[in-house]
Image (cartoon, grey):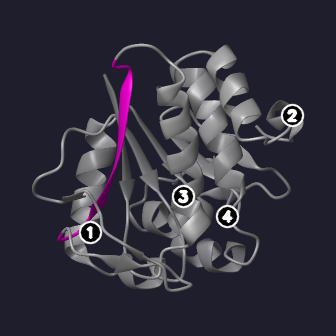
Amino acid sequence: MLHVGIFLFNDVELLDFAGPYEVFTVAVGLQEGLVGRVFTISEDGAAVRSVNGLQVIPDYAFNDHPPIDVLVVPGGNGTKAEMNKSKVLQWLKKQYEASRLTMSVCSGTRLLGKLGLLDHLTYTTHHEVMPDMATIAPLATVEKGVRFVDNGKLLTSAGISAGIELSLHLVAKLWRKEIAHRTAIYMEYGNWEELRRK
């Protein structure tokens, strides 16, 4: 069974995590049997508030969550604080190393960049974060005008809604394209495959 773990923190961008959560839970629900599980994690397991004030209660804390196969790192203004927390960075690095795949949405790239995980790779992020990323990850190359970039183990998406396309791409990659299509149809998301990506 595939475990998808979504990192949450205060001032996280709502759609950055809710979009992937919806995609992965719908994809799991469309399949027979125990093919996957989606859950959320925060540093201490306490409730967090999104950028616009929605309170969310995570399923787990850093010290009690199940193994993570796919790690989702969302963005939001809170990434500026999270990237300076040694405990958070240590946990993210450990999960990246242990996971099968890691994806960031929007300014979640700040955290990956701070860890050096984007060095010598191409990535994308929210257009307003690109100048900041040039300082955080000077050895990485930003690709503008794409919805997401797939580097194999590490994937990045552009801002906010682009995380939905990247999640659909991952559903096709992890299970099969038919499941991704059925998920998009259920969500009435349109022809996600025609969106420009790398």
Mark 1 touching mark 2, by CB under 8 A?
no
Please name the residue that numbered disc 4 is placed on: 160
Q: Earlier in the sequence, mark 3 or mark 4?
A: 3
Q: Quadrant of residue 189?
A: top right
The amino acid sitting under disc 3 is: Ala
- Circle 4 — which element? loop
The label shown at residue 115 is none
Q: Position of residue 133 (x, y in %)?
A: 61, 72
Q: Residues within 10 Å of mark 4 (few under 14, many from 20)?
A: many
Q: Quadrant of residue 186?
A: top right
Please name the residue that numbered disc 1 is placed on: 88
**C-alpha distance separating marks 4 and 2:** 18 Å
Closer mark to the observer between disc 1 and disc 3: 3
Q: Quadrant of residue 61?
A: bottom left
Residue at the (77%, 50%) spot, across then down: 147
In the image, residue 90 lies in the stretch drawn in magenta: no
Determine if residue 123 is in view. no
Please name the residue that numbered disc 3 is placed on: 18
What segment is highlighted magenta in the picture? 34-44
The amino acid sitting under disc 1 is: Val
Residue at the (50%, 18%) spot, across then down: 31
Q: Quadrant of the C terminus?
A: top right
Q: Residues within 10 Å of mark 1 (few under 14, many from 20)?
A: some
Please name the residue that numbered disc 2 is placed on: 191
Q: Position of residue 92 (x, y in %)?
A: 30, 57
Residue at the (38%, 20%) spot, across then down: 35
Most common secondary structure along the magenta stretch? strand
The amino acid sitting under disc 2 is: Asn
The number of numbered badges drawn on the structure is: 4
Q: Position of residue 144 (x, y in %)?
A: 81, 58
Closer mark to the observer between disc 3 and disc 4: 3
